[in-house]
Image (cartoon, rainbow, N blue to C red):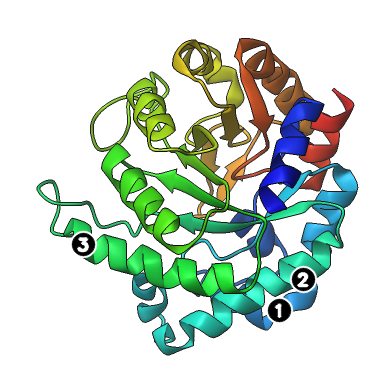
């Protein structure tokens, strides 16, 4: 059923993901310092309009804004008791926005707390955190799962184990990396590809990080070892901070699309945009 839908997308060629969520919501009035997930849940009309714009622009898959709605993320804002409500509601919202025209991915990310021995988070504790959020997301019926902006291979492996204990949905994993392909907590993205595809993920790659103009060699190195599709979902260039601490991204849609075309030639077959990208960026990718 769902897996066949994802497989059908793969058989059609390059798959388009969506663009940014957080930076787009900020531009539409979300204050600094709030829970993005809670704000999204409480402003469904804003989120639904954005997601519909992505689908209209050509996104084949949109991400439900469940990104940091895990126990730790919600505890920071005093709403951990509403974990199931918020995650389930955001998936349902995204399904309404997709309207059957795009698949919906339940979205997950790092807790920001490194695993032992680098940090203090135990593997079992992280497994429990991911499993709790996964159960809430999966109950709402997404088409697939995405772990993005991950910091280490071990963190991704923990997520994959948790996901496989909850459901059999397709799993996509993307890590944030340095421009040379190194991960933020040791190892390289090539090692991540080799490890995660062996664990059974459906696709693996990178997101956030830097602009697409710096990633051609990295994508080619991933493709050289990949037996699953390679994902590229970079930022709209490098951010420039203004005097209010707000990040601005200078790469316009057409330049972004031209750079992304080079990543497709290098081996990426699932592409989209991260920070600084909006529906106009996805439309440019569709045109290119």
Image height of 10 relative to 220, above or below: below
- Give the CA distance from mark 3 to mark 1: 34 Å
Residue 55 drawn at (x, y percent): 84, 51
- Residue at the image position 49 percent from the left and 19 percent from the top: 226
Question: Vertically, is 191 above or below 162?
Answer: above
In this rendering, is residue 170 above or below 222?
below
Q: Is residue 26 above or below residue 238?
A: below
Disc marking residue 43: 1
Crowding around mark 3 (Cα neighbors within 10 Å: few <14, some 14 to 19, many 20+) is: few
Q: Which residue is mark 2?
A: 46
* Residue 2 falls left or right of residue 155: right
Give the SS element for disc 3.
Answer: helix
Q: Quadrant of residue 232?
A: top right
Observer-nearest of 172 and 26: 172
- Would you say residue 244 is visible in this rendering? no
In this rendering, the label closer to the viewer, 3 or 1:
3
Task: Name which of mark 3 and mark 2 comes first in the sequence.
Answer: 2
Q: CA distance from mark 2 to mark 1?
A: 6 Å
Q: Is residue 129 visible?
A: yes
Q: Secondary structure at mark 1?
A: loop
Checking the image for residue 124, the label placed there is: 3
Residues at marks 2 and 1 touching, judged by CB atoms closer than 8 Å: yes
């Amino acid at each position: 059923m769902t897996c066949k839908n994802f497989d059908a997308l793969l058989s059609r060629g390059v798959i388009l993901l969506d663009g940014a969520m957080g930076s787009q919501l900020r531009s539409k009035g979300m204050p600094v310092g709030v829970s993005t997930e809670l704000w999204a849940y409480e402003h469904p009309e804003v989120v639904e309009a954005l997601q519909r714009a992505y689908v209209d622009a050509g996104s084949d898959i949109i991400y439900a804004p469940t990104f940091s709605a895990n126990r730790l993320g919600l505890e920071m804002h005093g709403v951990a008791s509403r974990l199931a409500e918020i995650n389930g509601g955001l998936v349902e919202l995204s399904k309404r926005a997709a309207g059957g025209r795009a698949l919906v991915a339940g979205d997950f990310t790092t807790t920001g707390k490194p695993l032992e021995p680098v940090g203090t988070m135990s593997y079992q504790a992280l497994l429990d955190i991911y499993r709790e959020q996964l159960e809430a997301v999966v109950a709402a019926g997404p088409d697939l799962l995405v772990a993005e902006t991950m910091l280490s291979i071990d963190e991704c492996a923990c997520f994959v184990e948790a996901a496989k204990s909850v459901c059999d949905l397709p799993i996509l994993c993307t890590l944030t990396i340095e421009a040379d392909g190194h991960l933020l907590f040791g190892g390289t993205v090539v090692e991540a590809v080799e490890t995660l595809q062996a664990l059974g993920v459906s696709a693996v790659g990178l997101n956030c990080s830097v602009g697409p103009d710096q990633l051609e060699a990295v994508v080619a190195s991933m493709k050289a070892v990949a037996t699953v599709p390679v994902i590229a979902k970079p930022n709209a260039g490098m951010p420039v901070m203004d005097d209010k601490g707000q990040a601005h991204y200078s790469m316009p849609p057409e330049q972004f699309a031209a750079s992304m075309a080079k990543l497709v030639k290098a081996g990426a077959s699932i592409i989209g945009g991260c920070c600084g990208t909006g529906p106009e960026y996805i439309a440019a990718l569709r045109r290119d």
